[in-house]
Image (tube, rainbow, N blue to C red):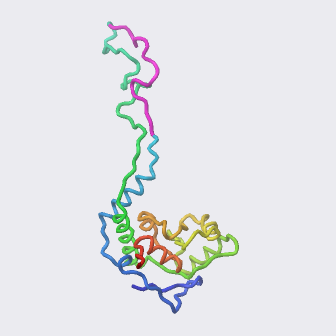
Amino acid sequence: MKFPVYTDKGKAGDSEIDVRDSIFAIEPNENVIYEDVRRVMANKRQGTANTKARAQVRGGGRKAYRQKGTGMARRGSMRSPLLKGGGTVFGPKPRKYTVRMNKKTRQLARKSALSLKASADAVKVIEDFTFDQPKTCKIVELLESLDIAGKKVLLLTAETDKVVYKSARNIPEVQVLEANKATTYQLLDADIVLLQKSGVEVLQNSIEPISKEN
């Protein structure tokens, strides 16, 4: 499979880049995609919510009111969950929401996500670029030249580029990330996956490493 390589002026150049069909052209496994997105979202949860049960709230040292003559039920404590200020029944307690998934399944989920994007023509490869200093207007011009301004864009670079990151961080719909760190959720959440040319191989090797021959 091949992708045209765009210039920073938004024009498709004469060059193309080969990508692996085993990553960008497989039959997507929707069940695995769902499970991996659920894992990513669950692992973001802090799990710090905490409530007090009946035994942990203050009060209840004296009887709420006299035993007889009130016409109401005999209530022994103000800590009852039925009363305001009482304990909580089955309330949340600190816990871990971590969901685990084996490496091969995570790789399959990312392959499926990339294949979905590629089939929808939502993957673009652009020549490597950087700036002398952070300039938001440079990123805006780049997006406009590629006709993807206003869309949710995931820009993947080969390595950490602080200048490009700072240039894009003020644009709400643009996220800059190293190619090997993109999760299934981030790939699916973006309208357009914009790959720097040098980041293509980094992305592919992070999903499907090439074994070294001895």
Residue placed furthest toward the front: 214
Q: Nearer the viewer, residue 122 or 115?
A: 115
Q: Residue at x 63, y 69 (%)?
A: 167
Q: Quadrant of the N terminus?
A: bottom left
Residue 162 in picture, x, y percent from top left = 63, 67
106 and 177: which is toward the camera: 106
- Specify the quadrant that holds the C terminus: bottom left
Which image quadrant for residue 140? bottom right
Q: Residue at x 43, y 39 (%)?
A: 94
Q: Position of residue 82 (x, y in %)?
A: 36, 25
Asked whether, in this view, residue 82 is left or right of residue 12, the answer is left
Residue 13 belongs to magenta span: no
**Measured from the top left, where is residue 175 in percent x and y?**
54, 66
Q: With respect to residue 94, does 176 lie above or below?
A: below
Q: Kindly tell me whether residue 153 is visible in this rendering.
A: no
Instruction: Indicate whether 57 appears above or below 135.
Output: above
- In the rendered structure, which segment of residues is drawn in magenta? 49-67
User: Which percent across, then down, holds residue 101?
Assistant: 35, 58
Task: Looking at this view, name the residue that lies furthest to the bottom.
Answer: 14
Q: Tell me if residue 35 can be seen.
A: yes
**Secondary structure mostly seen in the magenta stretch:** loop
Is 60 part of what is drawn in magenta? yes
Say if 89 sits above or below 47 in the image.
above
Classify residue 180 as left or right of residue 20: right
Q: Residue at x 65, y 70 (%)?
A: 163
Q: How many marks?
A: 0
